[in-house]
C-alpha cells in the first residue's frame, strides 16, 4: 500500500512538471487549429475546453504558407541550419582531432583560446561582426547567416574530448602501417564517433534554428528572413490573427522537436562521452 | 622530422577553424575593445576618431547605464543558480528508471525544441492581463489577476520564469549526461526519496558530476548575462527601465541611437562582468575541491 502511494506521488510530481513544460506548446497547437473567434472563448472563465479544441480547422496553416510566405522562412532556416551543420562538422571535427591526437607546439595555448570563445557569445560581438560582414560584402546574403556560425568553440571542445578517449594503440598501429593522419582521421576516428557527431550536429542546428539577433541585423530582404525573425515580425504585423501566429509558432517548434526526439538517445550519449569523462 | 610533419598536419587541420574564429570571433572582440575607445566621425562617414575613455566616462555619468548594470546583476544573481538547480533536479528526475519514464523524458525535452523567441511570444499571450490563460487559471484558485509583464515589479521575474522554462530543460541534458557516467550502484544509493538519500546525493553523486556542473554554470552564466530576446520582444526594456539589461541598452545605443562607440563600451563592461562572474565560479569550485 505504501509503495502504491509513493509510486502515485512520483507520477503526480512528474506529470506536474511535464504539464508545465508542455503547456505553452500544447496551447499553441490547440489554438492553431481553432477558428479565430474561438481562441479566447474558453480561456476566461477558464475551462478545460481552452486546452482541447472542439471544432478543428487547418485554415491557419493554409494561410501562413500560402498567403504570408511563411514557407520561405522555414526553408531559409532549414537551409542555413543544414549548411552550417555540414560545414561545422567538417571544420570543427578536424580541429578537435588535431587538439586530441596530434602533438605540436602551442597546442595548449590554442586550445585555451578556443575554449575562451564560448564565454563570448554571438550577441556580445554582433555589433562589430556587422562591420566585418559588411566589409566582406556579405550583408543581406546567405553567407552572412551561415559562415559566422561555422567555427564553434563548444563543438571543437566536444570533438576533442571525445577523440581523446579513443585508444592510442589504434593510432600507433595505423602509423606503423604507413597510414597518413588524414586517413587515420577519416577511417578510424570518424566511424567511431557517431554519438559525438550527432550531438555536435544538433548543437549547431539548434544554434542556427534559434538565431535571432544576428539574422535580424545582418539581413533585410523578405526573401532572406529566417524563421525566428519572421515570427517576431509576424507578431508585430498581424498581432490579432492569433490562430496564424500560433500555427507559425507550432511549426517552428515541431520541426526541431521532430529532428531531436528520435536522436535523443544518441544526443545524450554524445554529450556524455564527449564532455566529461576524465 | 616525424614530429615536424605531425605539427604541420596539425596546423593545416586547425587552419579552417582558426581562420573562421579569427575573422568572426577574435577580430570582432578586438574591434569591440578598440571601438569602445572611439567615436564615429560626423564629417567622414565610417571614420573612427580615437577618444580615449570618453565613452566610458560618458556612460559612468548616465543614470540609465547604472540602472541597467543593477538590473543585469539582479537578473543574473537569481537566474543562474535557479536554472542550474532546476536543471540538476530535472536531470535527476530524468535519470530515474521506472515504467513510463520514457514518456516523461519526452515531455522534459519539449522546451528544447521551442526557441526562446517563440517561447516569449506564446508566454506573452498566456500572461496577457486581459485575457491571458495564466490569469484565468489563477482565477480558478481565487487568486486575483496579475499585471505580469506590464508591471515594473513583476516584469523582470516573468522574464526569469520564461527563460528558465527554456533554460532548465536545455541544461538538463548536459547534467543528465553527466549523471549517466556515475556508476549505477552509486545512483541507486542516491535516489531522491528520503532525507538520508538527499544527504548521500549531496555527498556522493554531486562531487562526481562537478565537471559538467561547472561547464553548465559557466556557459549558462555567459548566456544569461547577454540575454536579449525577451527584453526585445516582450518589454523593450520597460516598464520604467525595470528590464533594461546592459545587452538591450547596448543594442539601443548602437542600432537605435547610432552611438556605436558607446554601445561597444557597454559590451566591454558586460564582458568584464561575465569574466568576474566566471572567475568567481571557478574559484568557488576549486575551493570546494580542497
Image: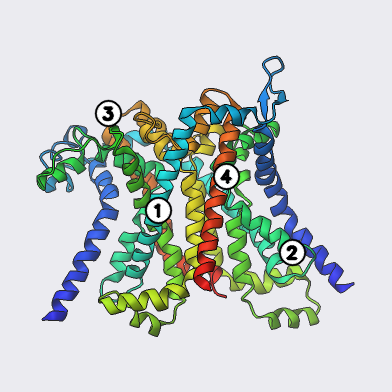
Say which residue label 3 marks: A240
Name the residue rendered at 18%, 47% in the picture: A51
Query: Mark 2: which secondary structure?
Result: helix
Q: Residue A237 carries which label?
A: none
Residue A147: give x, y in percent of width and height: 63, 44
Mark 1 and mark 3: span between their CA atoms?
Answer: 29 Å
The nearer-to-camera label among 1 and 3 is 1
Mark 1 and mark 2: span between their CA atoms?
Answer: 33 Å
The disc, 1 or 4, on the residue closer to the chain's N-terminal end is 1
Residue A263 makes an appearance in the image: no
Say which residue label 4 marks: B271
Q: Is residue B203 above or below residue A127?
A: below
Q: Are marks 2 and 3 in contact (CB under 8 Å)?
A: no
Quadrant (top left, top right, bottom left, bottom right) of the C terminus of chain A: bottom right
Query: Mark 1: which secondary structure?
Result: helix
Query: Mark 3: which secondary structure?
Result: loop
Packing grade of label 3 (10 A; few <14, some 14-19, many >=20) is few
Q: Nearer the viewer, residue B182 or B173?
A: B182
Q: Nearer the viewer, residue B240 or A97?
A: B240
For this view, does A112 lie left or right of residue B246? right
Say which residue label 1 marks: B167
Mark 3 and mark 4: span between their CA atoms?
Answer: 39 Å
Q: Which chain carries label 1?
A: B
Mark 2 and mark 4: span between their CA atoms?
Answer: 26 Å
Name the residue rendered at 39%, 85% in the picture: B185
Q: Which mark is residue A107?
A: 2
Amino acid at each position: 500500500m505504501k509503495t502504491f502511494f509513493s509510486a502515485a506521488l512520483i507520477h503526480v510530481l512528474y506529470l506536474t512538471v511535464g504539464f508545465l513544460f508542455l503547456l505553452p506548446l500544447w496551447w499553441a497547437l490547440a489554438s492553431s487549429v481553432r477558428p479565430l473567434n474561438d481562441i479566447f472563448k474558453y480561456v476566461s472563465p477558464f475551462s478545460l475546453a481552452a486546452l482541447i479544441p472542439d471544432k478543428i480547422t487547418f485554415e491557419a496553416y493554409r494561410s501562413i504558407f500560402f498567403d504570408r510566405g511563411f514557407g520561405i522562412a522555414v526553408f531559409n532556416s532549414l537551409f542555413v541550419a543544414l549548411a552550417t551543420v555540414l560545414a561545422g562538422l567538417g571544420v570543427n571535427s578536424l580541429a578537435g582531432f588535431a587538439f586530441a591526437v596530434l602533438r605540436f607546439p602551442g597546442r595548449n595555448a590554442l586550445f585555451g583560446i578556443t575554449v575562451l570563445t564560448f564565454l563570448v557569445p554571438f550577441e556580445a560581438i554582433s555589433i562589430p561582426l556587422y562591420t566585418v560582414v559588411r566589409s566582406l560584402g556579405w550583408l543581406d546574403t546567405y553567407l552572412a547567416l551561415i559562415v559566422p556560425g561555422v567555427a564553434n568553440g563548444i563543438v571543437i571542445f566536444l570533438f576533442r574530448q571525445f577523440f581523446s578517449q579513443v585508444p592510442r594503440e589504434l593510432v600507433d598501429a595505423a602509423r606503423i602501417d604507413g597510414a597518413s593522419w588524414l586517413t587515420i582521421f577519416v577511417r578510424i576516428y570518424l566511424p567511431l564517433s557517431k554519438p559525438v557527431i550527432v550531438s555536435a550536429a544538433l548543437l549547431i542546428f539548434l544554434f542556427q534554428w534559434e538565431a535571432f539577433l544576428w539574422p535580424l541585423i545582418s539581413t533585410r530582404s523578405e526573401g532572406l528572413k529566417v524563421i525566428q525573425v519572421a515570427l517576431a515580425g509576424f507578431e508585430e504585423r498581424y498581432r490579432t490573427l492569433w490562430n496564424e501566429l500560433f500555427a507559425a509558432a507550432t511549426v517552428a517548434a515541431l520541426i526541431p522537436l521532430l529532428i531531436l526526439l528520435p536522436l535523443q538517445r544518441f544526443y545524450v550519449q554524445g554529450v556524455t562521452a564527449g564532455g566529461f569523462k576524465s | 622530422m616525424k614530429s615536424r610533419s605531425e605539427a604541420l598536419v596539425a596546423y593545416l587541420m586547425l587552419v579552417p577553424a582558426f581562420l573562421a574564429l579569427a575573422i568572426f570571433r577574435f577580430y570582432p572582440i578586438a574591434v569591440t575593445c578598440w571601438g569602445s575607445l572611439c567615436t564615429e566621425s560626423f564629417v567622414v562617414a565610417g571614420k573612427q576618431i580615437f577618444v580615449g575613455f570618453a565613452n566610458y566616462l560618458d556612460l559612468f555619468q548616465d543614470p540609465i547605464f547604472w540602472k541597467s548594470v543593477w538590473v543585469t546583476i539582479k537578473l543574473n544573481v537569481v537566474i543562474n543558480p535557479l536554472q542550474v538547480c532546476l536543471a540538476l533536479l530535472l536531470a535527476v528526475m530524468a535519470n530515474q528508471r521506472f515504467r513510463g519514464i520514457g514518456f516523461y523524458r519526452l515531455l522534459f525535452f519539449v522546451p528544447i525544441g521551442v526557441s526562446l523567441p517563440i517561447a516569449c511570444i506564446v508566454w506573452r499571450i498566456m500572461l496577457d492581463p486581459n485575457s491571458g490563460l495564466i490569469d484565468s487559471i489563477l482565477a480558478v484558485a481565487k487568486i486575483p489577476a496579475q499585471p505580469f509583464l506590464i508591471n515594473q515589479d513583476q516584469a523582470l521575474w516573468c522574464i526569469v520564469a520564461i527563460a528558465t522554462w527554456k533554460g532548465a530543460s536545455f541544461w538538463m541534458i548536459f547534467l543528465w549526461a553527466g549523471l549517466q557516467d556515475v556508476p549505477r550502484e552509486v545512483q541507486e544509493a542516491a535516489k531522491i526519496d528520503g532525507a538520508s538519500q538527499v544527504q548521500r546525493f549531496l555527498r556522493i553523486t554531486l562531487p562526481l558530476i562537478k565537471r559538467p556542473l561547472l561547464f553548465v554554470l559557466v556557459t549558462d552564466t555567459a548566456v544569461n548575462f547577454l540575454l536579449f530576446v525577451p527584453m526585445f520582444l516582450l518589454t523593450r526594456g520597460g516598464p520604467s527601465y525595470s528590464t533594461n539589461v546592459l545587452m538591450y541598452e547596448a543594442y539601443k545605443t548602437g542600432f537605435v541611437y547610432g552611438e556605436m562607440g558607446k554601445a561597444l563600451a557597454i559590451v566591454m563592461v558586460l564582458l568584464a562582468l561575465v569574466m568576474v562572474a566566471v572567475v568567481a565560479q571557478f574559484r568557488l569550485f576549486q575551493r570546494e575541491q580542497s
